[in-house]
C-alpha cells in the first residue's frame, strides 16, 4: 500500500510560560537565566513545612488566553497533584489541573496553503507549574539540578487530533504563538523554552479508526516539529506496511540524525494518581471577573488583518504575513507613521526581512531595529535618495550593525546619484562602449535597455537613479 493511502493524525500539547513577574505558587522571580538555584525558595524547592499560594495573575493570564482562543471559562475549578518522580521535580508531584481545567472547548482558525480556512478545536487550557532543569555534565560525571525554572507558571493548550500534516501543525502553533504575543501573556521565546510542544502522531488507512499514537516531548522549534512529524509518520507507515505494530510510547527527537528514538512506554492519565491539592483553595470566578478580562483584550490578529485589508488595501497574503506576529504588525504600524507607504512596508516585511530571519533561523522578536527605522528606509527610497538595490544593502547592514538607515547611507557614501549632468556622462560612456545594444533596442529588443541600465548601475556601484537612467538612455538612443 502506498504512503498516499495513509492519513497522518496530529494533536499538540503546547506549553506556554506565562510572563508574570513571580512564580505560580511563590514570590521567586521568573526571569530567564541567572546562576543555577538562585531563583528559588523553600516553596519551589519543596522543603518541609512550605505551603503554596496561588498567584492571581496566573489565573488572569490563563483566562485571557482562553477567551482569545474562543474557550468556555470554568467558573469553579481547582488545582490537582499529578504524581510522578523525576530528579528535577523535588515534590515528586506537579501541581496541575485534571478534571476541571480553567478553560475548555475552544477553537482557532488556521489558513491552509490553498487559502481555505480550517478550524482546530482546543480541548482544554489548564494552568500548572514548570519543573526544574537537569544540566548534564559534558564529561559524564553526572547531572546537576537547577531549580530556577521550578514553579514558573505555564498554561498547557491541548488540541484535539485535528491536524493532518506537519504544515498544518506548524501553522496552528504559529497561530497560538501570535495570539499569545498579541494579548501579552507570554514572550513566546522558543529559544528560551517559553513556548514548546509535546507532539502526538499516529497514522491510519483512510477511513479506518484512529491508530496508536506516539508522543515526542518538549519540542521547541518549528523546524524540528515539522521534521519530526514527517519522519515519525513515515516510520509508522513503514512499520505497518511490514506487518509490525505501533507501540504507544514517548519518543525523543534527535535533530542531528533526523530520527526518533524510544524513551519510555507512554503513561495513561490514571498512572499519575491525580487528586485535588489539599493546600490550595478552589478557584472561583465570577461573571464580572471574566467580562472585565474579555473587555480588556487588545486587538487580535484576525481583527488587525481585516483592518489592514480595508484601510491599507493590502493583499490577503500580505495581511496574513504582517499580522502573523505581533512584532511584524507593530513594526508595520510604526513604519507607516514615518513613510506613509503601507504597501512598500509590507513588501519589505514579507520579502527581505522574512528572508533574512529565515537565513538566520531567528524569529520576528529578534529583529534588531525599530519600525520607525524601517519607515525611514522606505522614505529614503521614496524621496529618491537611495535606490532599491542600495536599500537592500542598507537593510543587511541594519541587521548586522544596527544603526539608523540615514546614518548607514551617510557613512557608506550610498546617496543616490540623481544629478542629470553626472547621469548623462555615464549614459554616454555606456552607449559608446555598446553600439550593438543601440541597434538591438531600435530593433525592438527591450532587453537591450535592461542590459544598458545594468551596466550603468555596475559602473556607479548601484548608486545611480534607475528611473533617470531609463529616461536618459531612451533619449540618447533616439538621437543616435
Image (spheres, rainbow, N blue to C red):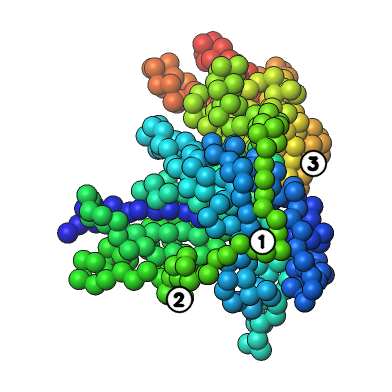
Mark 2 nearby-residue class (10 Å; few <14, some 14–19, many ≥20): few
**Cα distance, mark 1 to mark 3?**
41 Å
Q: Examine the rendered structure and indicate whether residue 316 appears above or below residue 92.
A: above
Q: Position of residue 465 (x, y in %)?
A: 65, 23
Instruction: Identify the residue under disc 3.
Output: 403
Can residue 358 be spotted in the picture?
A: no
Give the residue at x 42% y 59%: 200
- As helix, strand or loop, the secondary structure at mark 2 comes to strand
Q: Position of residue 217 (x, y in %)?
A: 51, 65
Instruction: Identify the residue under disc 2.
Output: 264
Q: Which comes before the other along the chain, label 2 or label 1?
A: 1
Answer left or right for 340 relative to 107.
right
Q: Are marks 1 and 3 in contact (CB under 8 Å)?
A: no
Q: Position of residue 378 (x, y in %)?
A: 69, 27
**Cα distance, mark 2 to mark 1?**
23 Å
* Residue 266 placement: quadrant: bottom left
Please identify, in this view, whether the residue under mark 1 or under mark 3 is nearer the observer: 1
Quarter in which the N terminus is drawn: bottom left
Mark 3 nearby-residue class (10 Å; few <14, some 14–19, many ≥20): some
Q: Examine the rendered structure and indicate whether residue 426 appears above or below residue 158.
A: above
Instruction: Identify the residue under disc 1.
Output: 129
Give the residue at x 36% y 62%: 213
Farthest left residue in view: 1
Along the line of sight, the residue nearer the viewer: 447 or 435 = 447
Q: Position of residue 198 (x, y in %)?
A: 50, 60
Can residue 59 be spotted in the picture?
A: yes
Give the residue at x 70% y 80%: 144
Q: Are marks 3 and 2 in contact (CB under 8 Å)?
A: no
Answer left or right for 78 relative to 380.
left
Please identify, in this view, whether the residue under mark 2 or under mark 1 is nearer the observer: 1
**Cα distance, mark 3 to mark 2?**
51 Å
Amino acid at each position: 500500500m502506498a504512503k498516499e493511502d495513509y492519513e497522518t493524525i496530529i494533536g499538540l500539547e503546547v506549553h506556554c510560560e506565562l510572563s508574570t513577574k513571580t512564580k505560580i505558587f511563590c514570590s521567586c522571580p521568573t526571569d530567564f537565566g541567572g546562576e543555577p538555584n538562585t531563583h528559588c525558595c523553600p516553596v519551589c524547592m519543596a522543603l518541609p513545612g512550605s505551603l503554596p499560594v496561588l498567584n492571581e495573575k496566573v489565573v488572569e493570564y490563563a483566562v485571557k488566553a482562553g477567551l482569545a482562543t474562543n474557550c468556555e471559562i470554568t467558573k469553579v475549578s481547582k488545582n490537582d497533584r499529578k504524581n510522578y518522580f523525576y530528579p528535577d521535580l523535588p515534590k515528586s508531584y506537579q501541581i496541575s489541573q485534571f478534571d476541571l481545567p480553567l478553560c475548555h472547548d475552544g477553537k482557532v482558525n488556521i489558513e491552509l496553503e490553498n487559502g481555505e480556512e480550517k478550524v482546530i478545536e482546543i480541548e482544554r487550557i489548564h494552568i500548572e507549574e514548570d519543573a526544574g532543569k537537569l544540566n548534564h555534565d559534558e564529561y559524564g560525571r553526572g547531572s546537576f539540578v537547577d531549580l530556577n525554572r521550578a514553579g514558573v507558571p505555564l498554561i498547557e493548550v491541548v488540541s484535539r487530533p485535528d491536524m493532518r500534516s506537519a504544515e498544518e501543525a506548524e501553522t496552528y502553533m504559529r497561530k497560538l504563538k501570535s495570539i499569545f504575543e498579541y494579548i501579552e501573556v507570554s514572550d513566546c521565546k522558543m529559544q528560551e523554552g517559553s513556548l514548546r510542544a509535546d507532539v502526538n502522531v499516529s497514522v491510519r488507512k483512510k477511513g479506518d479508526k484512529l491508530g496508536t499514537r506516539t508522543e515526542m516531548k518538549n519540542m521547541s522549534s518549528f523546524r524540528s516539529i515539522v521534521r519530526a512529524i514527517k519522519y515519525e509518520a513515515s516510520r509508522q507507515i513503514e512499520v505497518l506496511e511490514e506487518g509490525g505494530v505501533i507501540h504507544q510510547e514517548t519518543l525523543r527527537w534527535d535533530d542531528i540524525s533526523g530520527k526518533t528514538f524510544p524513551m519510555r512506554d507512554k503513561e495513561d492519565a490514571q498512572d499519575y494518581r491525580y487528586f485535588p491539592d489539599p493546600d490550595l483553595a478552589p478557584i472561583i470566578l465570577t461573571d464580572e471577573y471574566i467580562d472585565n478580562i474579555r473587555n480588556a483584550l487588545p486587538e487580535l490578529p484576525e481583527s488587525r488583518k481585516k483592518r489592514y485589508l480595508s484601510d491599507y488595501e493590502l493583499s490577503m497574503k500580505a495581511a496574513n504575513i504582517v499580522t502573523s506576529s505581533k512584532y511584524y504588525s507593530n513594526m508595520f504600524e510604526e513604519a507607516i507613521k514615518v513613510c506613509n507607504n503601507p504597501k512598500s512596508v509590507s513588501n519589505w516585511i514579507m520579502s527581505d526581512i522574512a528572508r533574512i530571519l529565515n537565513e538566520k533561523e531567528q524569529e520576528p522578536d529578534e529583529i534588531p531595529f525599530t519600525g520607525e527605522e524601517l519607515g525611514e528606509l522606505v522614505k529614503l527610497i521614496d524621496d529618491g535618495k537611495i535606490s532599491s538595490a542600495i536599500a537592500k544593502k542598507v537593510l543587511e547592514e541594519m541587521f548586522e550593525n544596527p544603526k539608523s538607515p540615514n546614518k548607514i547611507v551617510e557613512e557608506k557614501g550610498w546617496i543616490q546619484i540623481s544629478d542629470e549632468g553626472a547621469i548623462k556622462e555615464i549614459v554616454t560612456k555606456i552607449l559608446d562602449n555598446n553600439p550593438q545594444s543601440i541597434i538591438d533596442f531600435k530593433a525592438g529588443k527591450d532587453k537591450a535597455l535592461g542590459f544598458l541600465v545594468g551596466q550603468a548601475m555596475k559602473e556607479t556601484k548601484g548608486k545611480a537613479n534607475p528611473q533617470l537612467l531609463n529616461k536618459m538612455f531612451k533619449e540618447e538612443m533616439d538621437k543616435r
